[in-house]
Image (cartoon, rainbow, N blue to C red):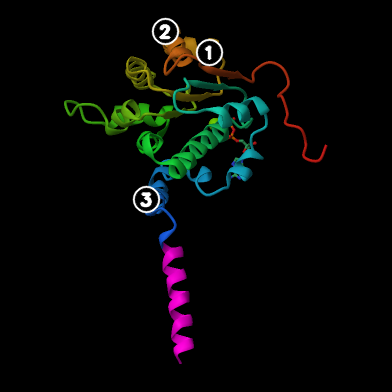
Amino acid sequence: MKLASELARNILDRVTTDEQLPDPALGRRAGDSVAIRSRLPLMFRSASLIELATRVHDKRLMAAAVSWRWGAGNVLLLGPTRIGKSTAAAMLFRATLGRAVRDGGRDWDLADSMRWFGAEELSLARREHPMGRGEAPEVVEACSARLLVLDDAGWDRDPAAVSAVLAARYERGWPTVITSGRTREQLSAHYGAAVVRRMAEAGGQNPVIVDCFGGAPVLAEEPGR
Ligand SMILES: Nc1ncnc2c1ncn2[C@@H]1O[C@H](COP(=O)(O)OP(=O)(O)O)[C@@H](O)[C@H]1O
Ligand SMILES: [Mg+2]
């Protein structure tokens, strides 16, 4: 009997030690990250990063997504529809969030306020917000996110909302990842040249501009070749 209870205590000791090994803050961050991830459009929430990677059809988009780190500047992803611009932006968001969960500290504090908005969503939010009640909450969130993904710029019916958000973010030096199916010239016609300059300049020293218009996409090597 003594032997059995000693064995049980040994096992129990080991289990409790194992239970205590993981950092409880890591578990908390992982739990909280679900709410941050749910700010992404549905199709980017549950697919794995590997799965998402198969939907990015130009390796320059992929490189921009995986190399971005806090301290880097804006990312401007331009190109024809379905090439994988939004997916690359979602990968950037998810990878940044994943590292923040793993590492905690300042990365986690920054990741906590990351947001994703469609350009038209901001324009609609502003239009539907009652006059005299300040700014629409979506616009406020887009301005105060430490990293914003602004998806599908250039198709918003009223460019004023996006222009205001980019101006506020420029002032703060906070980075924005912008995707657009329009060329820089078309974006300039839509928002004005100053706004497009902000897209390419704000948020840090070295913006990354991936322009997939004109010329064939740069394909990733096929696996196994
Ligand atoms: N739910 C999905 N499941 C699998 N593939 C998808 C899904 N949604 C879109 N795709 C594929 O992902 C690719 C990239 O789409 P997307 O990132 O939206 O391109 P873009 O933003 O450049 O228009 C497309 O070629 C499309 O076929
Ligand atoms: Mg898109």
Residue 14 within the segment the image draws in magenta: yes
Characterize the local packing of mark 1: few (<14), some (14-19) or many (20 or more) Cα atoms within 10 angstroms. Answer: some
> Which of the two discs, 1 and 2, sits closer to the camera?
2
Q: Is residue 58 above or below residue 8?
A: above
In terms of secondary structure, what is the magenta stretch mainly? helix
**Label tally:** 3
**Which residue was labeled with disc 1?**
186
Looking at the picture, how far across and down is residue 57, in whole percent? 67, 32
* Magenta-span inclusion, residue 207: no
Q: Amino acid at mark 1?
A: Gln
Looking at the picture, which amino acid does disc 3 mark?
Ala
**Mark 3 vs mark 1: in front:** 3
Q: Which residue is mark 2?
A: 194
Residue drawn at the location 76% of the way across and 32% of the way down: 221
Name the secondary structure under disc 3: helix
Task: Determine whether 17 is above or below 137 in the image.
Answer: below
What segment carries the magenta color? 1-19
Q: Are marks 1 and 2 in contact (CB under 8 Å)?
A: no
Q: Where residue 41 sits: x, y (%)?
A: 47, 41
Disc 1 secondary structure class? helix
Quick check: which quadrant has ligand 2? Answer: top right
Which residue is painted at 42% across and 7% down in the image? Answer: 194
Disc 3: which residue: 25
Residue 37 pos. (x, y %): 44, 44
What's under tag 2, amino acid-wise? Ala
Left or right of 82 in this view: 72: left
Q: The C terminus appears in which quarter of the rendering?
A: top right
